[in-house]
Amino acid sequence: MRVWQVVLYVSPVTVAMSLMAIFLCTLLIMFFRVREPAVVPWVSRFFLAVWVMVIGVATLSVSQSLGAGGTGVWLIPFHTLFLEDHLLGSGERDMYIRQLTANALMFVPLPILVRASFVRVSAAQSLLACMGLSVLIEVTQWLQSAGRVADIDDLLLNFFGAALGAGIYLMSACAVSRMRRWPLLARDSAHSCY
């Protein structure tokens, strides 16, 4: 199976399941952050490195030789969604929507892992790091000239996914902060809703 074929599995059910899994994993990170504050950053850095490599493979793997294909920059947001039906069939439109969804979903774990890895990083800083990675990916795709284009849609959806991840992180932090009264989380914690 080629890397791009993962998009074929994107559906409302898989997106909902993925977001729920990310939320539960974030709760686990927060729980262990209270119980084992020295261990969580090191484990999170490992998973951050792995996830960045997964994103790199998914976005930078080429199907043509470097320099062999066309290249371009698409600056009109969501232009493909608004093409007339005779220019874009329903199957192609469906695949485009799946790709947009996958672009957003791919960046959801990043701010969570950045904030868990580096405790003093704020939500804004983690979003800025995610946007920096997204811009780096788009510039690299453009420079490869292997049939890939730098697309504003990718930047917008990567940011949306990262913002969603930052929101999940904040919700998890608030939930764990409120659960500190529970016997399982009785150890005092400096973490609160932040």
Image: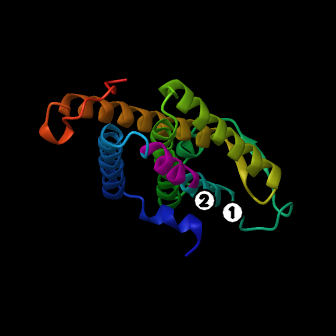
Residue 41 counted in the magenta span:
yes
- The residue identified by callout 2 is 58
- Residue 127 at x, y percent in the picture: 54, 31
Task: Please report the residue visible at 60 percent of the width from the left and 59 percent of the height from the top.
Answer: 58
Q: Is residue 165 above or below residue 102?
A: above
Could you tell me if residue 87 is visible in this image?
no
Write down the residue under mark 1.
Answer: 61
Residue 169 drawn in magenta: no
Q: Specify whether 28 is left or right of 112.
A: left
Residue that lies at the very extreme toward the right in this rendered image: 67
Looking at the image, which residue is at 47% across and 51% down?
Answer: 43
136 in relation to 89, above or below: above
**At label 2, which amino acid type do we have?**
Ala
Query: Given the image, on which type of amino acid does mark 1 rest?
Result: Ser
Mark 1 nearby-residue class (10 Å; few <14, some 14–19, many ≥20): some
Q: Quadrant of the N terminus?
A: bottom right
> Which quadrant of the figure has residue 34?
top left
Give the secondary structure at mark 2.
helix
Query: Badges 1 and 2: C-beta atoms under 8 Å apart?
Result: yes
Position of residue 53 in the picture relative to residue 10 (left or right): right
Residue 80 seen in the figure = yes
Instruction: Give 137 or 186, whichever is nearer the viewer.
Output: 186
Magenta segment: 40-49
Task: Please name the colour scheme applied to the rendered image.
Answer: rainbow
Give the total of numbered labels: 2
- Which quadrant of the structure image shows residue 75? top right
Question: Badge 2: few (under 14), some or many (20 or more) residues near its Cα, within 10 Å?
Answer: some
